[in-house]
Image: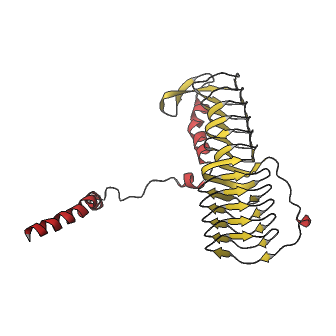
Amino acid sequence: MIGEGLVYAAFAAAIALPALPAALELRARRDALPLALDPEYAGDPRYLGKSFRQKIAGLLRDCEVGSDVQFLHRANERARILDDYEAPAGSTQTCAILARGAASVGEGARLLDLFGAESIKVGRGAMLRTVLAGGNVAIGERVTIARFADAERDITVGPHAVLEYGAFAGGTCRLAQHVAFHRLFGNPVTVGKMHSKVEAARPAGETIDSDTISAHGIEIAANTLHTGSIKSGGDVVIRAHARIGGNVIARGSVHVGTGASIGGHIYSERDVVLGYDAGAGAPERSKTVHASGSITLFPGAYVYGSIVCEGRGETR
């Protein structure tokens, strides 16, 4: 009996011991307060760019042109204050550049953070950590941005560029073909030129005045007018020139065909493909396209608002 009791005691201890630290912490309540999360960070796609501008505003206001100062309290980094700035082709800059005017970066140059109160142009094959402009940003072919680019106005991104985090524009964010990204924001984000949609050219299709919900895959036929939302336990396929008034939510992938439009958000637990001239949102109706996997954007594809993918995004 004693031996059996010891076995039960040992079993109970094996269960209780892993929970002991949690029980002690719960009793002490040292972490009872909620985490201090900045709601702006969660809700504003351009939070990083706006935060950067706020942090350097004092430097631009108080420091003389030509001075080198400690950069954002980073012990090993300096920033140089200039009026305008031009990085020669193939040059390397080891400090951040804060320009009160315009800035340009030559082909193949290597920089850290670059801020220009006016517009910024980045030449072919250059590599930068961060790019922020008070005007427009023009990013050339095969440029790599290790963190992000942010412009108060428009951003254009050349072919084969790599945006390791993303690009965010107060105006249009226009991407060329074969651009890699994770997050984008613009009004709109578009691949190449947006083509106007001529409704009269489309043959009339079916009208669905309700939500469509299924545990399985869902396919919406071409030219369909679907006024409600779509929720699928599988994949969603929306054929050419269909119009969806609500959201599209899928446990699988979402494929939006040529010329189709989504009035609401798109959420996929796998991949999202926006075909030629397909898109989401509208002016003054900012929406989000989110994929746990990849997002592929074909020429003419557009989104008014945010594009977010946990995997790799790419334009075709």
| Towards the viewer: 308 or 268 | 268
Q: Is 104 rendered above or below residue 210?
A: above
Can residue 145 be seen here? The reply is yes
Q: Position of residue 50 (x, y in %)?
A: 61, 44
Q: Residue at x 20, y 62 (%)?
A: 13
Furthest toward the left, the residue is 2
**Quadrant of res 148:** top right
| Towards the viewer: 73 or 128 | 128
Q: Which residue is drawn at 74% across and 61% down?
A: 256
Can residue 169 be seen here? The reply is no
Q: Position of residue 257 (x, y in %)?
A: 77, 61
**Quadrant of res 24:** bottom left
Q: Which residue is drawn at 51% across and 28% down?
A: 77
Furthest toward the bottom, the residue is 209
Q: Tell me the quadrant of the picture where the N terminus can be found.
A: bottom left
Q: Is 52 rendered above or below residue 185?
A: above
